[in-house]
Amino acid sequence: MTTGPKAARRSSHLSRNEPDDAVPLARREILVGVCGGIAAYKTCALASALVQRGAGVTVVMTAAATKFVGPLTFESLTSRRVLLDLWSAESDRDSQHIHVTERADLFIIAPATANSLGKIAHGIADDALTTLVLAAASPVLLAPAMNERMWKNPLVERNVQLLRDAGYLFVDPESGWQACRTRGEGRMAEPQTILETALQMLVPGKATGELPSRANLKRHQPG
Ligand SMILES: Cc1cc2nc3c(=O)[nH]c(=O)nc-3n(C[C@H](O)[C@H](O)[C@H](O)COP(=O)(O)O)c2cc1C
């Protein structure tokens, strides 16, 4: 194997079609939906990690999400305007809910609240995030986060199953410390785990380097 400055120079001059290990998500477009849960703070790290790996990242937030993290944080991390509602666009109204989904390679919802999971499962599109999810042309990866009793509520379980059956992908929540100051299942997967799942989906066959292999991707392809 050739190493040293020469090889390093060569790897920084890869052709446009050759994936660069440093920016494996170059030329990839990722939509990141943020719902109203305390885990929204973790999504800042996820958005930044995606950007650092070369992806173009557009964030859409629910109104509840903005109570937890300000849109300015995501705008600073992604260098893009955050989508907040369907009515704010002046000149590019169309791009708010059509073009943005057409150019996305992946749509990640993190955290996905019980409320938004339920709305998506039932085809409800009453805000920018749920409208974009229903209009998505890309795979949709959901990272639920909620209190354990909510996560184990039969109604939520039924909605999750409906979504799995419809082909939505999940990074399942983990067990651990929850914001309600108890331990239990429902804590959002770590940003690193979601990142690894995205890399596995978007960069097939590529080793993910320093990333731990604990992604908990539940795939269900519609029959
Ligand atoms: C402090 C606080 C934390 C919350 N955390 C969660 C959560 O982790 N998961 C969840 O499903 N709902 C959580 N909720 C409730 C949601 O914010 C609420 O259901 C809201 O309507 C979700 O709206 P959205 O799905 O449009 O973002 C929390 C509410 C508060 C006040």
Image (cartoon, rainbow, N blue to C red):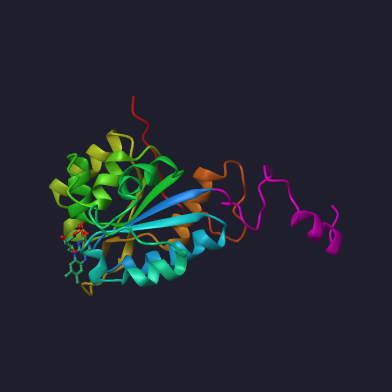
Q: Main secondary structure of the magenta part?
A: loop
Residue 148, by quadrant, is: bottom left
Residue at 28 percent of width and 34 percent of height: 165
Side of 106 where 128 appears, left or right: left
Residue at 50 percent of width and 63 percent of height: 49
x, y percent for residue 75: 40, 67
Out of 153 and 89, give the one closest to the viewer.
89
Side of 221 where 163 appears, left or right: left
Residue 24 covered by magenta stretch: yes
Residue at 39 percent of width and 67 percent of height: 74
Out of 43 and 223, give the one closest to the viewer.
43
x, y percent for residue 208: 59, 53
- Residue farthest toward the top in the current orientation of the protein: 223
Q: Which residues are magenta?
A: 1-27
Classify 37 as above or below 26. below
Out of 11 and 38, give the one closest to the viewer.
11
Query: In the rendered picture of this protein, how many numbered marks are placed on residues?
Result: 0
x, y percent for residue 95: 36, 47
